[in-house]
Image (spheres, grey):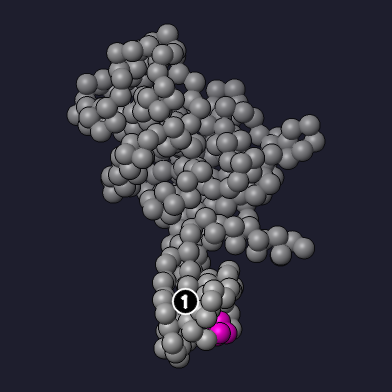
Amino acid sequence: MGVVIETKNLSKVYAGVPAVDRASFSVKKGEVVGFVGLNGAGKSTTINMLMGFIRPSEGSVALFGEELTLPGAASSHQRIGFATGDMSLFDSMTGRQYHEFIARAYGVGSQSVVYQHLVDTFDPQLDKKISTLSRGNRQKIALIAAFMTEPELVILDEPSSGLDPLMQQHFLDLVREQAKKGTTIFMSSHYLNEVVDVCTRILLIKNGKLVKDIPASELEATSGKLVRVVTGKKVAPPASAEVVEREKHGHDYTLQFIYKDSPAVLHAWLGSLVDVKDMTINDHSVEAAFDDLYDVKEAEDA
């Protein structure tokens, strides 16, 4: 597969402080890559450099094999769709007028089957001025504009920000639909579960540095199981368990722990218990796995 995005030592420094620090990564055709990190980690700055909105302090960006240069950016931008959670639109236009403007700029039909499908999916308020719309409705307008041109690459920065839960689900369905068509998607998100749900890879950025590049399935797997047992006798947890709660209520003992090792070992430990009053096993949160990745990196840096 061809490389659609490639960065080499990409850096941006503000007042001597690196917002992005020598980030090097590539995205191949057809990949859906999640770009995650805490607020201020450097996600939006990186995306703004990918789009050519700001100039890197150092390093380079290539899109479809063409190095991005400023001013002028890259001719490949005609092959890219873009939306962000705080995207500036033409407030004096209606949503419909804005989409007609995008259609003319990209040389596509404003009443295409693709466009109508997007409108039917997100049900935006097309005939009101954008300045009067809620944040969620503005986001619908921006997302439709990003996908209506049938781009080869879609870059999204917090794309579902402001959407209600139903629209968030429609957005995820759209990403899956586009992925099946071979569209390359690079998206940042505050909602880690949605990234795991639709992405094939996850890039983790911390303090401007890329610290992990892993399959999305690995992040989900590392979240482990949250186990809670209530017994009539005090029991010791499995050797590798991370104890969350250990309490006594009357004659009963409650033990809750996170377990990430062999399921067979956990099964054997559970089978050895006696006088079990209650037991639950749930998936530990993906957010917790994300925190663990940060903790691991901090330990490595110490």
Residue 176 horizontal/vertical position (percent): 31, 47
Tell me the amino acid under the disc marked 1. Answer: Val
| Predominant SS along the magenta part | loop
- The residue beneath circle 1 is 229
* Residue drawn at (31%, 33%) of the image: 150
Give the side of residue 149 with respect to residue 76, left or right. left
Spot occupied by residue 146 in the image (x, y as percentages of width and height): 38, 30
In magenta, the rendered stretch is: 234-238
Q: Where, quadrant-wise, is the C terminus in this rendering?
A: bottom right
Q: Quadrant of residue 80?
A: top left
Q: Is residue 69 magenta?
A: no
Q: Quick check: can you spot residue 150? A: yes
State whether residue 90 is above or below residue 55: above
Residue most extreme to the top: 92
Q: Residue at x 40, y 28 (%)?
A: 136
Residue at 46% of width from left, 55% of height from top?
A: 201
- Which residue lies at the image location 47% right of the left edge and 73% below the top edge? 227
Q: Can I make out residue 178 in this image?
A: no
Q: Position of residue 286 (x, y in %)?
A: 48, 58
Counting from the top left corner in percent of width and height, residue 183 is at 35, 43
Please give the count of numbered marks on the rendered protein.
1
